[in-house]
Amino acid sequence: MTGTLYGLGIGPGDPDLITLKALKRLQSAPVLAYPALEDGDSLARAIIAPHLTAPKIEIAIRIPMTIERAPAQAAYDNAAVEISRYLEKGDDVAVLCEGDPFFYGSFMYLFGRVAEKYKVEVVPGVSSLTACATSLQSPLSARNDILTVLPAPLSSDILRARLQEADSAAIMKVGRHFARVRDVIFDLGLENNARYIERATMENEKIMALADVPKNAAPYFSMILIHKRGQAWK
Amino acid sequence: MTGTLYGLGIGPGDPDLITLKALKRLQSAPVLAYPALEDGDSLARAIIAPHLTAPKIEIAIRIPMTIERAPAQAAYDNAAVEISRYLEKGDDVAVLCEGDPFFYGSFMYLFGRVAEKYKVEVVPGVSSLTACATSLQSPLSARNDILTVLPAPLSSDILRARLQEADSAAIMKVGRHFARVRDVIFDLGLENNARYIERATMENEKIMALADVPKNAAPYFSMILIHKRGQAWK
């Protein structure tokens, strides 16, 4: 009997926003894997730290933050080999995924490498999308709203075209694209319908109007939410 | 001291997909409110039933399923009055919300009626959106995909135009709109990129190709996911 790979959505940052299901799998799996900075900490590991009740074998998947994709692909190749070794022995491996594993998550890279050969079970999690709406105390989408989710690395032309026709929109992974995205939103006159939020539900969560966000200071885990109709519940 | 209104995302259906945070609030609040059919059960109440450890005061918010909005609005007006009575006395009230409270949820109608006068805390939940992707074992969106969320009641022309430009799309609240939505998807030649799913993560979950779904049989809690690029992780 080979082991099972569990892709666990651990939620957006508040350790209490993990589901009971993910918590059970986390606590029962003997091996834990998680993405980590090349020479630093793992945010995912830090989020679930309060829930670790017993020592585990731990695999830090160190992802080089390069523009080219080959170094990251190589890191996932190596991680898949290492994880498969435990699965082959019959050990379950829990992979920690910030937010939800299948919502813009890096888990899919492991999934694609492991799912054809081993059993994989994915546990959905609270995504940053709805966590940000909660922190802003404002419904993300309602009734027949069309919600558009846009990754910030897209070109300004694409962002502009999609924002023009959106009812509500979430711009993900803002990070180093902040200044460019902000300019698009101001060009469209949507700045008063937009809010910037970083590290939603974490202790260092910040919410700001776009004009107040310092240039070049947005972390990767930042998002801009836009509601064209203003407060959806009125 | 008045009480707090808790809007609790209880997840998509599997009772274990509730978060620790929602579970704590659920168990500590003396009053529980939830949407229910006019003369029947409450799905939300059924989902959390395994977690009820002590009797509570319960408020079933019975929503008439009419096309006109006035009867439902009146039901929320009445519920807000009843809930406010407990808040005024200093009792916390937990409102159960399937999925996430701010993601196409009916919680916003209570929120709009109560938030100006009382303290409201919303706990985000696992949405049906990512739960469906998990059940389909297929990433919902990846890398720089644009994800478009479309409520099925929108006109066929709008659905067609938005699906034409989507990378991946989720069509929510399919229910009685199924046959019309299916026809739009076939017209666009996207039927092999689409999957139908109902009651994701519940015991009676069903996944089907569009051609296999019986006409007029889709429940309200059904969704169609479409990935134009096929398997996103390859």
Image (cartoon, coloured by chain):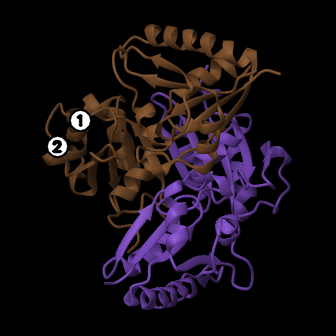
Chain colours: A purple, B brown
* Amino acid type, residue under disc 2 in the picture: Val
Q: Chain of mark 2?
A: B
Q: Residue at x 34, y 20 (%)?
A: B40
Q: Badge 1 is on which residue?
A: B218
- Looking at the image, tell me whether mark 2 or mark 1 is earlier in sequence order: 2
Question: Residue, x 27% and y 52% (percent of image)?
Answer: B195
> A34 or B133: nearer the eye?
A34
In the image, residue A162 sits, relative to residue A228, either above or below, namely below
Q: Is residue A106 visible?
A: no
Residue B17 at x, y percent in the picture? 48, 50
Q: Residue at x 20, y 44 (%)?
A: B187
Element on which disc 1 rests? loop
For the residue pair B74 and A17, the one nearer the viewer reads as: A17
Horizontally, residue B122 falls left or right of residue B190, namely right
Numbered tag placed on residue B213 in the rendering: 2
Indicate the amino acid at tag 1. Answer: Ala
Q: Is residue A203 left or right of residue A93?
A: right
Circles 2 and 1: CB atoms closer than 8 Å: yes
Chain under callout 1: B
Q: Is residue B123 above or below residue A77?
A: above
Which mark is on residue A46?
A: none
Q: Quadrant of the C terminus of chain A?
A: top right
Q: Where is residue A52? Give x, y as percent.
A: 65, 70
Tell me if residue B96 comes above or below residue A102 in the rendering. Answer: above
